[in-house]
Image (spheres, grey):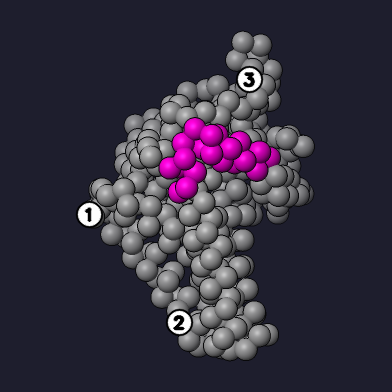
Amino acid sequence: MGLRFAADVRTLIWVALAAALLAAQFARPELAPYLFWLSMYFALACGVIAHNHNHCPTFKDKRANEIFGHVISVFYGYPTFAWIPTHNLNHHKFVNRAGDATITWRHSKKNNLWVLVTYPIVSSYYQSEPISAFIKQAKQKNRKLYRRIQIQYAVWAGSHALLLALAIGLHGTLQGLILWSLTCLAPALFALWTIMVFNYVQHIHTDPWSKYDHSRSFVGAWTNFFLFNNGLHYAHHENAGAHWTKLPEIHARSAARIDPRLLHQSMWWYFIRQYLLAPFVPALGTTQVGRAAYDAVEAEQVATADIGFGEEGTNEAILRA
Ligand SMILES: [Zn+2]
């Protein structure tokens, strides 16, 4: 049941910390108002870990990977199979062009706070379609996978129901409900919302047809330490199967060729500059780099997502029944 990469000891420590934090707040609910923001960070970290795990499984053993997927789904807030139809088979294939369920330009081509904040709601709605199609296909063509999807939903929903029951059992209805909301519900919603926000900022105003400018990257050391190198998005799209520890190396090889407008040191500063300052000083805002994702190109334009099995970018370890 060993790790495929020794560096994932840190992944395991982060998940253990998320669990310890939850246990501490369940034991001492008076701490929750002070600690729940930490739970939010660890839930987000579990979302990033889920993304990593889905592209590059953490353990050598298949069963261990499945169990690990269950654990992080409780913190992150959704069964991990959903990454396959909306991300591996879809986003990595279309990279913000037509056909990508997570396009950043569906209702507006602008990069402002309103579009950013509402993007996860719009994106979730359009992701539900490929998720349903994937489940339907699994039901018809791959019963083993279908069973695993059902188990993932059952573990995820069952765990939250149990945690809610435990919180109420330990601390009474109102206190328990508040405790569960602060330590389980809010962090999971925050993680799902923020993961989609990351997708938005990493692709808005980029050029999906370009070899080097298809993604926006955040190169700061702190951002990448706390987010397992998730800031290095160019490198991730260059080699989606690469382990997160390899991304700095992949980024460094091509960094000089990436348009500097797509390289940001700090994610925090990007958020402040783009969404708080740029509305007043437009020169501080992002501009389209190269060809926009929505520029129609006859031969390359793809009308609908073609969700199938065994396509490029698929995590074989997960799809293999
Ligand atoms: Zn990815």
Q: Nearer the viewer, mark 1 or mark 3?
A: 1
CB contact under 8 Å: marks 1 and 2: no
Q: Residue 300, percent across and down?
A: 60, 15
Total residue callouts:
3
Q: Residue 80, percent across and down?
A: 48, 50
| Side (left or right) of 248 relative to 192 | left
| Residue corresponding to mark 1 | 2
| Residue corresponding to mark 2 | 24
Q: Nearer the viewer, mark 1 or mark 2?
A: 1
Identify the mark at residue 286; answer none if there is no mark: none
Amino acid found under the numbered disc labelled 1? Gly
Element at badge 1?
loop
User: What crowding class fits label 1: few (fewer than 14 Cα within 10 Å), some (14-19), or many (20 or more)?
Assistant: few
Amino acid found under the numbered disc labelled 3? Val
In the image, residue 293 lies in the stretch drawn in magenta: no
Element at badge 3?
loop
Q: Residue at x 23, y 55 (%)?
A: 1
